[in-house]
Amino acid sequence: MRMILNSEPAVTLGALQPGDSAEITGFRVSGEQMDFLIRLQEVGFIVGERVEIIGSAPLGKDPISIRVKDAVYALRRSDADLVLVKRSGNS
Amino acid sequence: MKKRIALVGTPNAGKTALFNSLTRSHQRVANYSGVTVESAEADFDLPDGEMLSLVDLPGAYSLRPYTEEENVLAGALKSSGFSGMILVVDATQPERAIRFLLEVLDSTDLPAVVALNMSDLATKRGFEFDLVQAAAILGVPVIPTAAIRKHGLSGLIGALGVALRTQQRKKQALLGAPAEVETVEQITGRILEFYKRADAVLKKIMVRKGLPDDRSRSIDRIVLHPVAGPLILILVLGLVFQLMFNLAQWPMDLIDSGFSAIQGLVSESRLPPDFKSFLSDGIVAGVGGTLVFLPQILILYALILFLEDFGFMARAVFMLDHLMGKVGLHGRSFLPLLSSYACNVPGIMGARTIESKADRVITTLIIPLTTCSARIPVYGLLISAFVPNVPVLFGLKLQGLVMLGLYAIGILSALLMGGIFKRLLFRGQRPPLLIELPSYKRPSLRSLFRGLVYRIQLFLKRVGTVIVSTSVVIWILLSYPKSSGGEGALVDQSYAAQIGHWIEPVLRPIGFDWRISMALIPTFAAREVMVGTLSTVYSLQEGAAVSDSGKLSLLLKTEWSLATGMSLLVWFIFAPMCVSTLAAARRELKSTRYMILMIFYLFALAYGGSFLAYRAFL
């Protein structure tokens, strides 16, 4: 679909580790998850936005907490894999 | 007709705090037809003395509904029920808030004022706003507020008064009205466009000097620490239960003796005997039996509200999601399940905050397996009758361990059934988790109190109607037909006794005779009534009052076998003996089929479990 904007090997948001920063480049789309994808964008996960992985849950290192637009959200890694990113730094 | 004003904002923007600070303390529950989400509504005055009504609509991230609660907001704004609105914006998260603000302003033409809330915090964090410029660009007044400190409220109300009289806004619909069916590209385009405009607006009205606030991050380093985090969670939960049981004891005794006193007054009055019995054994006993748990519900709710306000509950969901996912549950199910330990009804009502239908249904279905306080008197009676209080380990006594075991069986079977329902009903679905971890805030006592009052109102409204009507039906079953042999023979020949004889063959294999079968009937109004019914039945049989539970438990010990006692104990873990819970489930899920499934599987578990217990102890 048109929404996949980058042609580089994709890094997904769900693969990042606490301390990593990245820029959102696009989304992996599948029909069922459309509503969720729209909601992600509504709360601030939009193309071009910078995100930072703040931490992960104590058990299983999943979900992860992500800072975007002055707010912090918790997402499961599998759900965060819908978001394609370009790594821009890590600690 | 009083004008109604809508209070609109994103979650965690301090909307409810603003509602509590603006309005008089008397609040009502506002209902919308066809939906199950209620909003609080209360009055406030304009400077010119006109009285208005403020409705605290559910928070939302967008007008495009994603949850049941957001549906309510979208519907309410489309309705013609409001004369104006107060838009609450979190000044510490300006981008997301302004995007939502633009979306709302764009889609309605109601007179509006903006409350730039938490402006004190925003100033501390280095945000500076040009309010004159903001009002000019947005076309509505922008008033800085700090709801909890009650700053800026009179300015806000004044501006609202002026806006209601003079403001002329047009629905801008700059992006065109949303079509009925939109493609994802169109929706995404709309979101991006609003963000672009929000960005442009913010560039003109805001400068940012400070860095993001790091205090919440530092707290999270401890609260979400790999080792300390889970320990803190366990400690907090342990403390919540400890407080719920210990603090509630005294007020519960007080309520109990209050209702006994009312029953005493009724029996001494000169009313006709039938009517006396109706009032005392029907209404007062039914209502009192439920109200007695109000202190526990209040304390549990107060603690949950406190932890939620503070920001801890979102972290608990964050930490537990992985674990709950293992059995097919969603992290969001944690809060409803926790609330249901005082009473299952508010737990089921709390499940409405879960976004996905699958998780909402599963959570509701398993809530009756959590040990609500109504089971405690029955557990207490049966344990004291049949379990010897011998020390077992480290000074722990057997009776306490059995009680703990009953709780454990409850939660383990809830988790197990959750996994089974997931596989049977919603195979393969794993609805996503998206939850904001808000910055930590000091909870406001006033908000806490108002929130508590509101939830209690909801609870009483729900339970009141069901309990009263069920109590009446059960009283009739126990009191009619009238026998000729005087008071003594009354219960033995009642419809309830007939039903008891009638269902005895079914319950015989699990060790229940017709008396127990009969005593089970009134427990549909409230489980704890079992204790009262048993004492009535055995008083009549013994010819002497068996009023205190000590005597009753001694009597049960001689009348029943150990196997019967254990079987009944297990029965109360599982059996769906509470009409209010069933009614709440049906209403919240808008489905009779799920309610029937709930009744069926709970009876199946109860019967199977009791059968095993009966055989094991026979």
Image (spheres, rainbow, N blue to C red):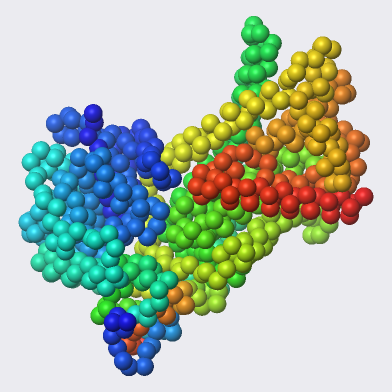
Decide: is B209 above or below A90: above
> Camera-side residue: B584 or B20?
B584
Q: Residue at x 89, y 52 (%)?
A: B615
Indicate left or right for B534 with B448 as reference: right
> Camera-side residue: B244 or A35?
A35
Indicate left or right for B11 with B516 as reference: left
Q: Quadrant of residue B216?
A: bottom left
Q: Position of residue B1 (x, y in %)?
A: 23, 28
Q: Residue furthest bottom?
A: A8
Q: Is residue B455 visible?
A: yes
Q: Residue at x 28, y 85 (%)?
A: A5
Instruction: Count up the numbered dots.
Output: 0
Q: Residue furthest front?
A: B181
Q: Residue at x 71, y 39 (%)?
A: B377
Q: Position of residue B42 (x, y in %)?
A: 32, 36
> Camera-side residue: B182 or B589?
B182
Decide: is B354 above or below B32: below
Decide: is B140 above or below B175: above
Indicate left or right for B294 with A12 as reference: right
Indicate left or right for B195 with B449 as reference: left
Q: Position of residue B447 (x, y in %)?
A: 38, 45
Q: Residue at x 39, y 84 (%)?
A: A12
Q: Is residue A54 visible?
A: no
Q: Position of residue A61 (x, y in %)?
A: 51, 78
Q: Quadrant of residue A60?
A: bottom right
